[in-house]
Amino acid sequence: MNKHDLIVALSEHLSLTQEQCLNFVNVWERIVTEELCADRRIILQGFGSFSTWSQTPRMGRNPRTGEPCHIEARISVKFKPGKYLLDSLNKEMSKEQSVNQLKSNKDENIQ
């Protein structure tokens, strides 16, 4: 899903125009960016949290040439999923595993 797909989905779910949803997404991005730039965590209860962390400088390797190169220190963002998000993902995973198990059992019984 890209930004446009998100805007279309929001528009359909909220019965708002795509322009209103675009404004909402842009403001949300700006607020998240401002908070992270101010070194503050963003916690969305049950969904997850965003926080900044410092990557240290290190030596890397150019994948094309194999030549060593220096990678500068930088600030990056971590996302830690919340309990409800993980539970939802794992329910879907267990449903898929159950379906796959049923299919493999059917295949074994046919042979």
Image (cartoon, grey):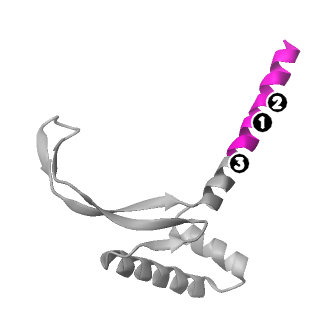
Percent position of residue 98, x then y: 77, 36
Whether tag 2 and tag 1 are in contact, CB under 8 A, the answer is yes
Relative to 74, say whether 41 is above or below: below
Does residue 80 appear to the left or right of 14 in the view shown?
A: left
Label located before the other in sequence (3 or 2) = 3
The image quarter in which residue 67 lies? top left
> Gap between marks 2 and 1, in whole Å?
6 Å
Residue on which disc 2 sits: 102
- Which residue is outermost to the top? 111
Which residue is at 47% across, 81% downward?
Answer: 26
Amino acid type at mark 1: Ser
- Range drawn in magenta: 93-111
SS of the residue under disc 1: helix
SS of the residue under disc 3: helix
Q: Main secondary structure of the magenta part?
A: helix
Is 95 within the magenta?
Answer: yes
Neighbours of disc 2 within 10 Å: few (<14), some (14-19), many (20+)? few
The answer to which of 34 and 9 lies nearer the viewer is 34
Residue on which disc 1 sits: 98
Label located before the other in sequence (1 or 3) = 3
Count of number-bearing discs: 3
Which residue is at 72% across, 36% downward?
Answer: 97
Residue on which disc 3 sits: 92
> Gap between marks 1 and 3, in whole Å?
10 Å
Is 6 within the magenta?
Answer: no
Percent position of residue 85, x then y: 62, 59
